[in-house]
Amino acid sequence: MKATEFSSGPDYVKTLVIGSSGAGKSILASTFPGIKNYCDFDNKISSTIKFHLGNKEILEKIEFEPYGKMPIKPSVGKKSRMQSFIDDMKKWCDLQNAGKPLPFETLVIDTITTLGDSLLEDYREVSQLAVKRPNKDQNSQSDYGLFGNHIRQIITPALALDCHVVIIGHTKPDKDESSGIITNQIMFPGAFSDKIGLYFEEVY
């Protein structure tokens, strides 16, 4: 195929936005077009709402699901945090596969860092109870092997949705002892932290 024949369809932005806490990443996501659907694992949607307080036009286009406030374990009449998120992702993928419009124009996962923590907590408390661990509060090596595959299964369909996708991550300073150079690395469990940027068209 020649480059002149290439057609990418609608021009949706698929971006990873990383930065330190309080840098304004969630507020940046609120400037994307249309209805924004925040998957709020950080319990910090209030900062975005306060920033736009008084601007009814913007606030009416912000929807969110407070996954961070959901219980990690299922209870009577309530699904667990990760099961709720996975079920919602499936619902959106099913809509797209059926040729139906999504109920939002921008999907925001806020943040991939705390989503990762929730996923590992789910392994300990819900879905991988039979796995042997050094202690009940520490994940096993097999958990981290499963984690990389599971995160790919979340990121890949999210980025395939016909909408803008903004995935947010926290960073931490990391010093190279040989060169003395300090860089900001994404806070993310396991070896997948070095690969996560490969999945995105743009990283800021």
Image: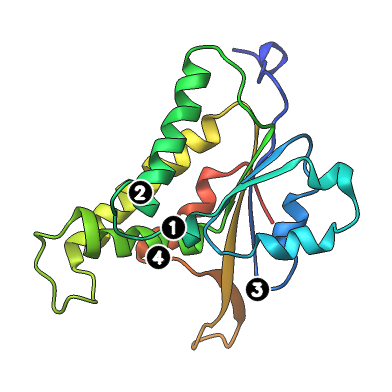
Residue at coordinates 15% horizontally, 79% vertically from top-left? Answer: 135
Pick whichever, 174 or 16, lies toward us: 16
Q: Is residue 36 left or right of residue 41?
A: right
**143 left or right, relative to 203:** left
Question: Crowding at label 1, few (<14), some or many (≥20) Cα neighbours within 10 Å?
Answer: some
Point out the frontmost of discs 4 and 3.
Answer: 4
Q: Nearer the viewer, residue 71 or 83?
A: 71
Q: Amino acid at mark 3?
A: Ser
Q: Earlier in the sequence, mark 4 or mark 3?
A: 3
Q: Position of residue 59 (x, y in %)?
A: 80, 47
Query: Which disc is residue 117 wearing?
Result: 4
In the structure shown, which secondary structural element does the residue marked by tag 4 occupy? helix
Q: Are marks 1 and 2 in contact (CB under 8 Å)?
A: yes
First along the sequence among labels 1 and 4: 1
Residue highlighted by disc 1: 70
- Which marked residue is nearer to the observer: mark 2 or mark 3? 2
- Disc ID at residue 108: none
C-alpha separation, residue under disc 2 versus residue under disc 3: 33 Å
x and y percent of residue 13 in the render?
69, 37
Q: Is residue 25 visible?
A: yes
How much space separates mark 2 and mark 4, taking CA atoms? Answer: 20 Å
Q: Which mark is residue 20?
A: 3
Mark with earlier residue (1, 3): 3
- The amino acid beneath tag 4 is Asp
Q: Which residue is mark 2?
A: 78
